[in-house]
Amino acid sequence: MEDHIILVDLLDREIGYEEKMKAHVRPLLHRAFSIFLYHDGKFLLQRRAFSKYHSGGLWANTCCSHPRRGETLAQAVDRRLREETGVSCPVREVGSFIYCYKFNEKLYEYEYDHVFVGDYQGEVAPNREEIEEMAWVSTEDLTAGLTERPLDYAPWLPQAAAIAAAAVYRPSSSGLGL
């Protein structure tokens, strides 16, 4: 059975539902999320499985997906993080953005993307149907990669990573960051 994802307006208000693939063909603005796990100055990135219907073989954040009809954002984030990486850990939302990307004449991403971060150090068990490989990458190396080899990365990653990095590594008034 095809997943029905949540369609939203420009203010992220729910306006309906559509089958996932139909929403990506038309394109229709829908709710999505990007999760970044981090620890000790590095982000955990995934290289998407080559078999994915878009962006196969490209580097992306730790995990990303869509909440399903009848599922809260928090439920979806927890579900997909466990399904894709085998990890269960606390995460928090740090921002959001809208982006639209045309892969070809019949496939688009048009998403209201919520960005989540979580501090994690531990084992990861990547789902090989979703993930080709995973790597811990410093913000400096990620910035250099996005600049020097932008086609190696998923189209949403620059915006999502900037939001995550600003939330994780910004100085606080106490000098302790997060």
Image (cartoon, rainbow, N blue to C red):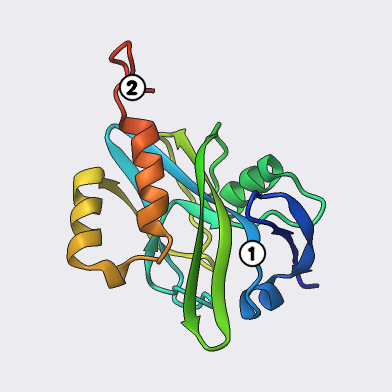
In the displayed structure, does residue 110 sit left or right of residue 169? Answer: right
CB-based contact (under 8 Å), mark 1 and mark 2: no
As drawn, is 13 to the left or to the right of 170? right
Label of residue 19 in the image: none
**Residue matched to label 2:** 177
In this view of the protein, which residue sits in the foreground, 88 or 56? 56
Q: Position of residue 144 (x, y in %)?
A: 18, 55
The mark closer to the camera, 1 or 2, is 1
Q: Residue 167 lies in what quarter of the image? A: top left
Q: Nearer the viewer, residue 19 or 102?
A: 102
Q: Which mark is residue 29?
A: 1
- Which quadrant is home to the C terminus? top left
Type of the residue with mark 1:
Leu
Q: CA distance from mark 1 to mark 2?
A: 33 Å
Q: Residue at x 58, y 55 (%)?
A: 112
Q: Where residue 18 sits in the image (x, y, percent)?
A: 77, 69
**Residue type, label 2:** Gly
Q: Residue at x 35, y 46 (%)?
A: 162
Residue 81: % across, % down:
57, 48
Label 2 crowd bin: few (<14), some (14–19), many (20+), radius 10 Å: few
Q: Earlier in the sequence, mark 1 or mark 2?
A: 1
Residue lying at 29% horizontally and 32% vertically, measured from the top left: 40
Image coordinates for residue 156, horizontal then vertical, percent: 43, 61
In the current view of this chain or complex, which residue is farthest to the bottom? 105
